[in-house]
Image (cartoon, coloured by chain):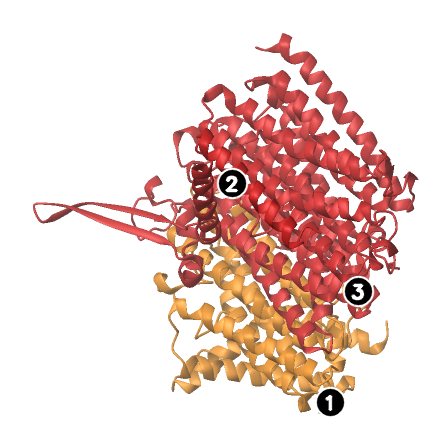
Amino acid sequence: MSGREAIALAVQLAGLALAPLLVGGVQTVKARLQGRRGSGPLQPYRELRRLWGRSAVDPIGTGPVYRAAPVAVGAALALCLLVVPVAAVGTGWPAGHDLLVVIGLLALARVAMALSAWDTGGGFGMMGASRDLGFAAVGEALLVAVALVASIPAGTTDLRAMWAASAGPDVWAEPGHWCGAIAMGLVVVLETGRQPIDNPDTHLELTMIHEGPLLEYAGRDLAVLQWAAAARHWVVLVLAAGLFLPHPSDFAGGLAALALGVIVLVVALGVTETWHAKMRLLRVPPILLAGTALALLGVVSWAAGGGA
Amino acid sequence: MALVPGAPVALSLRVQAAGLIAVGTAGGVCLLDGRSVGSGFTSELEPAVGVDPLSGLMLMMIALVAAPAAAYAAVYLVAAAHPRALAVLTGLFPLALIGVVTARDATLILGAWELMTLVPAAAILVAGGAHGGGDERRAVFEYLAITHIGGAGVWVAVLVLAERGALGDPAGLASAGTGVQTLVAVAGLIGFGTKAGLVPLHSWLPRVHPLAPSSISAVMSGVMVKVALYGMVRLLMEWLGSPAAWVGFAVLALGAVSALSGILQALFQRDLKRLLAFSTIENVGIVTLALGAAVILADRGEPAWAALALAAALLHGLNHAVVKALLFLGAGSLERAGAGRDLDRMGGLLRRMPWTGAAVLTGCLAIAGLPVLSGFASEWATLQALLGLGRQDAVGLALAGGVAAAALAVTVGLGAICFVKVIGLALLGAPRVPGAAEAVETPRGMWAPLAALGAACLALGVAPGLLLPALADLAPGGGGLPRGAGIDIPGTSLPTLGIALALAVAAATLLALRGRRTAAPAPVWACGQAVEPSLAWTSAAFTKPVRLSMWGLLRPEREVEVLSRGGVPDEVRHRGAVPHLIDGAVYAPVLRVALAGAGAARRLQSGSLRLYAGYLVGLVVLLLLLARTGVLG
């Protein structure tokens, strides 16, 4: 393993621990913009520690699926985090670095959560799960369309190659890349479950999406699920910063640009949450479809320009 | 118990299963070794039989589905109405399928093709005969009518090919001119497409597949539609030579429409077997999508991508055959165990029927395309091929690839909802009706085949790379993909084994971290209300977000009736349904025109001798006139 690979692996492993910091960062930015002091970016860690010390809850009538769901979600997200490379250097580890695998693992986590909701049978969990899966069906089209635009410069969906091919200023001369970047913005909001699509800070049952199935969990189960939500932030923000924010092609510069890009995105999420109210649920799918259409427009634009 | 009459039936079915395994093994050897046995395709009208690697794949697929189905039938049929007749038909059906895939001349192809159509029809009539069977007779009539009218396309295509000497010789049709090529392409697509269940020729499929006994439904939905797709692969990859790009675009569009409308209909079904039948249309659509991409990419001069697309299509066909057999047999087990077929009246069966339940759970996750089960690998490969198409630098191709990839993604997403719904309604939660609470696990002879099919889903998901390169080699341009557990394509790879191991390690670590779980029992939170069975979520409730957000496309029907007594609302009645739009928009007008035509024809056929004499005189006069004016030469 070369030095760069060791550093990349260290950053990825650190990501497992740093992910909650991103959620804390968004909350802090939001608090400041709303004129509050907020509880600081370390608050998610305090919550995880508190939950870790508590016992779990088994809703009456649930079976093994309810108990296995947090483990499946946590494992899928941990793997996801390790599949997404940093700064074009992946470790030569056996799970590969393919973008479509990331999409598959996110789907695995989503389905595990929905199954736990079915196992408890509670109305709020089911409400959240059915909305989550319903939006994800359109969301997957958006993700795949964005994956297609992003894969045009590299000619492959291997994330290391995609990262390298989108480095430097040249790619920004292509209008298709801009279309992809805007569509990726929608992916970020959807997959992190933030306003205006979902609100992670509310527990008003009637509007919940991602929080719905979490209602029935407590203790370490809930801690794992909250960590997984944070890991989802890491995965999506690193993808967005790596594929659709400007970055140089060398490793050190790439890492610096990645760190900067993720910070910019965290601030952007905080600003959007403050500035934009949650939208009506039924308006979400049309907006996701519009994003898909925009990404496909980007594909056409690349093709009309003679490809990469 | 029917041990005495049942025993020979069971024994013969087990012998059949063993024989099918032998046939499948031989097929597998042909595929993996790239070996051909027996005759090649010939345009002579003399019976000829042979196996090449593509037929080998089909033999393997038939055995993978029909052998477990026969073993299952050995227990399942003993309690059925006419075990002996159904056992004969269960045995005959795979033989007809094997006949189609090993036939090497026009007579055998068409003969086996017709037999393949008739056997399940007979099985449905035999099984339904015991209890009235009016619905069965009507559905079988529709099945035979649609598949025979559509199936005429197969006759036209195969006979024209034989006449031009093109069955064995790819260059044969090239010399025949574009008119004949177009005729063969269109006739073949209609003929094979009808039998495969491609929208809009699919109307028979969801009516018939649920009616047959499960051991026959499994083979129908698992392999019969794949045999039709096999015909399409032969047509597109061999018989047509190098088909024009428009053929590819047509196939791509048919695939996308079938996949999307299949899964959209499946989503709203409550009858488990009907849901599975609609999902078959979806998966046939996905295979067709990949076939279309293969044709377009080959025409574009991208043989490596075309080979990947073809391999993805064949792999998805195999995966779907296995998983659909598992789910249809599983549906039969649930029905036999006393849970019925209505999803809203099941619940909690994973606890009551651990083996069957676990196998059905595996099958649902596999067909939903989740890593690392079989559906994920083949859908990944299909998506890669479509993305490869979308990266071409011609606007039409890029747009087609992009739209097709997005359509596949939506299909997979909706498929996840659909099968999460099946798992949730059937297997999880509390029993919804007393019948489900008393369901008992089936005998081992019925769950063991399910477990074997579940293991096959896992194996095909973890090691698809053992098969995919051999499938890519079937493409005219050759594949040249490396063989291994995972899938390696130019530029990227899907290391399924690595992902499976990493997931297992991560899950084990998390379990170890979580330590000994201490949990307090508590009621489910329902705002402090008591949780009652009437609060349980139904199929309609779970799919409501999709129904509302796709309102414009689905046109759901909804009726709310408030019954008031003395000005006080006393009772609210609600009825909702998602209509089958293609039936209404396409079939109803066709049916109206056909009935009107039949009415007019009946007026001509009045039975009056004088009128018939008049027809004769008129005909003679007409012929004389034509002869006189020189039109007849």
The residue mark sitting in front, 3 or 2, is 3
Which tint was used for chain A?
orange
Left or right: B442 as drawn, with respect to B397: left
Q: For this rendering, which residue is in front, B598 or B288?
A: B598
**Cα distance, mark 2 to mark 1?**
53 Å
Furthest residue to the front?
Answer: B628
Report x, y in % for residue A148. 67, 72
**Element marked by disc 1:** loop
Label 3 vs 2, first from the N-terminus: 2
Furthest residue to the left?
Answer: B566
Question: Circle 2 is placed at which residue position?
Answer: B274
Task: Identify the chain of the residue marked 3, using the numbered disc in the image.
Answer: B
State which quadrant residue B345 falls in. top left
Q: Residue at x 61, y 68 (%)?
A: B403
**Cα distance, mark 3 to mark 2?**
36 Å
**Cα distance, mark 3 to mark 1?**
34 Å
Question: What's the residue type where badge 1 is placed?
Answer: Gly
**Which numbered circle lies on residue B412?**
none
Question: What's the residue type where badge 3 is placed?
Answer: Ala
The residue mark sitting in front, 2 or 1, is 2
